[in-house]
Structure formats: structure tokens, C-alpha cells
Amino acid sequence: MKTARKDADERPAVVTAADNLVFESAESTDHLHELIGAGRRRIVYDLRNATYVSGAGLGVVADAVKQARRRGGDIKLVVRRPEVRRVFELGELDALFEFYEDVESARNAFADCVGEVERTLLWKSLADD
């Protein structure tokens, strides 16, 4: 009997924004895109240190989550400051993301759900037996 192959990215990758999320400080968002391009499907984007998110920063993160979802993945956000969360609400992007208070909760949220891609791979591996 075959066993389902575990993904190389089983444990979610964590990207921490060192400061505010604006287009000019795109180092962490570049890292998001690198991870997605490398096939990582589970990413936690830690914005606990951010006190401000620009409109351009919102666009970059929204684009990253769309890319991740097209590849069967997702990005979960860690946001503690209400003013940062409010920027996502004002940009009408709050429905696009899941928000968490800490990194561990966001990581655990991936473990609590089995996505469509995982179900498809599991059923395919069982059918191949």
C-alpha cells in the first residue's frame, strides 16, 4: 500500500515584516513572492511590527495571496494593531484574508483544515493503491 507523500512545505513558512508595509520597503513582500514561486503553499505573513500599511502595500499582499491560491496555497496574516486591520477593511480586502493575533495561531489554522488540493492528492494516492 502506498502512503500519501508529505509536502516539502508541510510546516507553514513565516515571513515577518520588519516595519511598515509600504511599496518602497518591499523586502518581505519580495520574500513572499519567492516562496510562492518556489512552491510553498502555506505562508504566514507576520505584520505585528507594522503600524502602517499603504495602499500599494495592500495591493502587493493581495496579489501575493491570489498567486498563492492559484497554486493551491494560502497566506494567513498576523495583525495585532486595530489601525492596521482597519486599513484592510477600508481597502475592502478584509474578506480576502484570515487574521490572527499570533504566529502560532496562524500556523495552527493551516493544520485545522484540509484544502481542496490536499483532498485531491489524498484521494488520488488512495486510488493508486
Image (cartoon, rainbow, N blue to C red):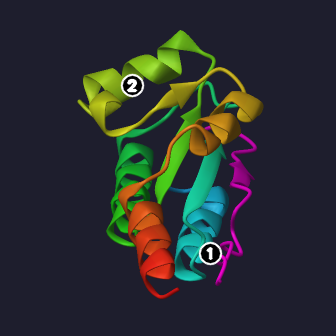
Residue beneath label 1, please? 4
Q: Residue reaching furthest top?
A: 82
- 34 and 18: which one is in front? 34
Establish if 78 lies above or below 101: below
Looking at numbered disc 1 in the image, what kind of residue is underneath it? Ala
Instruction: Please say whether residue 25 is visible from this viewpoint.
Output: no
Residue 7 falls within the magenta-colored stretch: yes
Instruction: Tell me the SS state at disc 1.
Output: loop
- Asked where in the image residue 69 lies, by quadrant, the reply is bottom left
- Residue at 37% across, 29% down: 88
Q: Which residues are magenta?
A: 1-21
**In screen coordinates, is 95 left or right of 75?**
left
Image x and y of residue 94, in percent: 33, 29
Image x and y of residue 47, in percent: 64, 35
- 84 and 74: which one is in front? 74
Alpha carbon separation for disc pair 2 and 1: 41 Å
- Residue at 72% across, 26% down: 102
Looking at numbered disc 2 in the image, what kind of residue is underneath it? Val
Residue 87's tag is 2
